[in-house]
Image (tube, grey):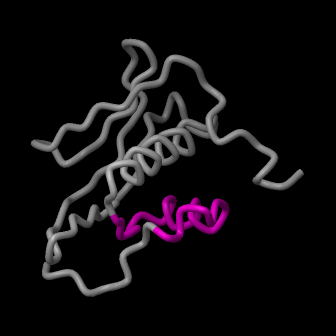
Amino acid sequence: MSSQDTPKIVHDDLRVARDPGRGRIELWQKDQFIGFLGYTEETVGDQTVVVLQHTIIDEAFGRRGYARALVTIVLERLKAEGYLIVPECSYVQDYLRRYPEYQSMVYEGQLQG
C-alpha cells in the first residue's frame, strides 16, 4: 500500500484557526485543541511566502495522523490563497516527499530575513 492509497485526513470534525499574533495555525477537533503549525510570513516582491517552522501535536494525540491532517489542511488553504511556502519543518519536508503534488508551492528564491 503506497502513501497515495492512504487518506491524508482520517479524522472528522477538524478545523484550523490562524493565530497570527502567536505565529501559528492551530488544529482543533470540535472544542479540543490538538496542535499547531508554527509559521512566519515574508513578502518577496508582490508574493507572500509562508515559512513553515515546526509542527507540534499534543502528546496525547501523537502517532494518529493529526500532523498529516494539519499539514494537509494548511497546504490546501495556502495553495487556494496563492501562497508559496518554505518548509523549514522536518515533518513538512517529509510530507512533501510523500505528497509531491505540493512541490510547486515551494519557494526557491532567497528570503530577506
Query: Which residue shows up at 44% across the image and 67% down it?
Result: 105
Residue at the far top in the pictured view:
31
Q: Residue lying furthest bottom in this view?
A: 110
Q: Residue at x 15, y 44 (%)?
A: 20
- Left or right of 88: which side holds 13? right
Quarter of the rendering containing residue 52: bottom left
Compared with 59, 103 (above or below) is below
Above or below, 39 against 46 in this view is above
Was residue 102 drawn as part of the magenta stretch in this picture? yes
Which residue range is magenta in the image?
84-104
Residue 43 spot, x, y in % from top left: 14, 69
Indicate the quadrant containing the C terminus: top left, top right, bottom left or bottom right.
bottom left
By secondary structure, the bulk of the magenta-drawn segment is best described as helix
Q: What percent of the width, then of the height, locates residue 88?
A: 38, 69
Query: Across the whole image, how many numbered discs are drawn on residues?
Result: 0
Where residue 17 sits, quadrant-wise, is top left
Left/right of residue 104 with respect to residue 108 in the rendered view: right
Confirm whether the magenta stretch covers residue 56.
Answer: no
Q: Residue at x 32, y 35 (%)?
A: 26
Q: In x, y percent, where is residue 83?
A: 32, 60
